Amino acid sequence: MKRLCLLCFTAFCLFSLGACQTERKAQTLMKPSTFGALADGREVHAYTLENSAGMSATFIDYGATITSLSVPDRDGVSRDVVLGYDSIDGYVNGSAYFGAVVGRYGNRIGKGRFLLDGKEYRLTINNGENHLHGGNIGFNKVLWDTAILEDSDTPAVRFQYVSRDGEEGYPGTVTLKVTYSLTDKNELRIDYEGVTDKITILNPTQHSYFNLSGNFNEKILDHRLMIEADSFTPVDSGLIPTGELLPVEGTPLDFRQSQPIGARIDDPFEQLALGKGYDHNWVLRNYTGPGQVFKAAELYEPDSGRLMTVYTDQPGLQFYSGNFLDGSAIGKNGIAYGLRSGLCLETQVFPDSPNKPDFPSATLKPGQVYRQTTICQFSTRD
């Protein structure tokens, strides 16, 4: 009898150990694959994370780019919900920043100039008379180093890029690490860490275009959006903030309650006319300082039931409604990405902050560590 009990106990322990190991390995990192090659012969590799809840995400080391994000709908059917390309050529030649990390400075800097420590710096002009998303060869147009992190309960992929002093006009050599992880709560977590050897500015962001329907032939106008913001930063004709903070109340930019994106996008409102739709920075009300993660927005697609909740520790959120997509970008499965076929929710310091003393600072000094966390959590709603 004692021997039987001992055998049962041993079997139970082995079963329990196996169950623990299964739980620990619920998130998996698939073997890297070749995604293509650059003109100079360097290979581009793809890395895929999967979890036990039916979600997967694939990244490439070119631009630290999210190339696909497969998310279950209310019936458990998973579909890709981010715009992108089937091959490396699209990312190399494209200009829409699909899925990439952009920087050094995400968003615009007016006339590509700013003062820092009493010295004027001039950046590459690549958006009218302004600087946008890091210039002609920003973080989205370079090959990053990669590390696979498998020691924790949640495997992750870490990309690292060293941006040299003077690159696109920016001062200082900056080393930036971007870590992607995928949890069993269907959270895509993005952690940034950066250092510099000279005073500079740093404001990277993730530039995925979302269409939660999973059908990129459809527009995102029926998506419902909620933004935790009472004010926004109005822009001029070059989409550079004027420096003011205006209340959203009484305007088509009021997303304090969930609203269909298409309900007011064509209203005769000056700010919408300037942006050809939504292309503005919202001032997040729950921001309390670096490192404090809070809920910033919700995006809901009624037909599929997919819900994306965005958490961040950044003071601003740029909502861009795909106003400049015109069908010229041929993406996955040969689909031409038309007007408003995807939208961006970019967590950030405000646009043109280096030229606006009252805006949150994007300055990084030697000895400091830049950190940012943004989480996109996916679920469903009936």
Image (cartoon, grey):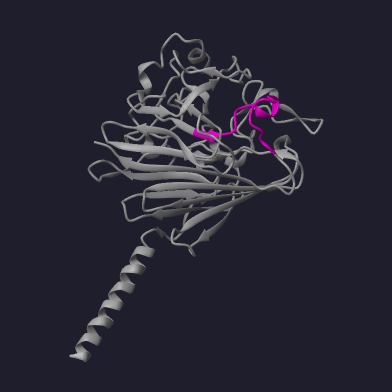
Residue 203 located left or right of residue 191: right
The answer to whether residue 83 is visible is yes
The answer to whether residue 87 is visible is no
Q: Magenta region: which residues?
A: 346-363
Viewer-nearest residue: 89 or 367: 367
Who's the residue at 66% across and 35% down the image? 362
The image shows residue 324 at horizontal and vertical percentages of: 48, 23
Who's the residue at 66% across and 25% down the image? 358
Q: Tell me which secondary structure the magenta stretch mostly adopts.
A: loop
Up/down of 115 relative to 332, above or below: above
Q: Residue 358: within the magenta?
A: yes
Residue 162 located left or right of residue 287: right
Q: Residue 225: within the magenta?
A: no
The image shows residue 245 at horizontal and vertical percentages of: 57, 19
Farthest residue, direction right: 118
Viewer-nearest residue: 351 or 122: 351
The image shows residue 205 at horizontal and vertical percentages of: 55, 38
- What is the quadrant of the C terminus in the image? top left
Farthest residue, direction top: 268
Viewer-nearest residue: 231 or 239: 231
Farthest residue, direction left: 1
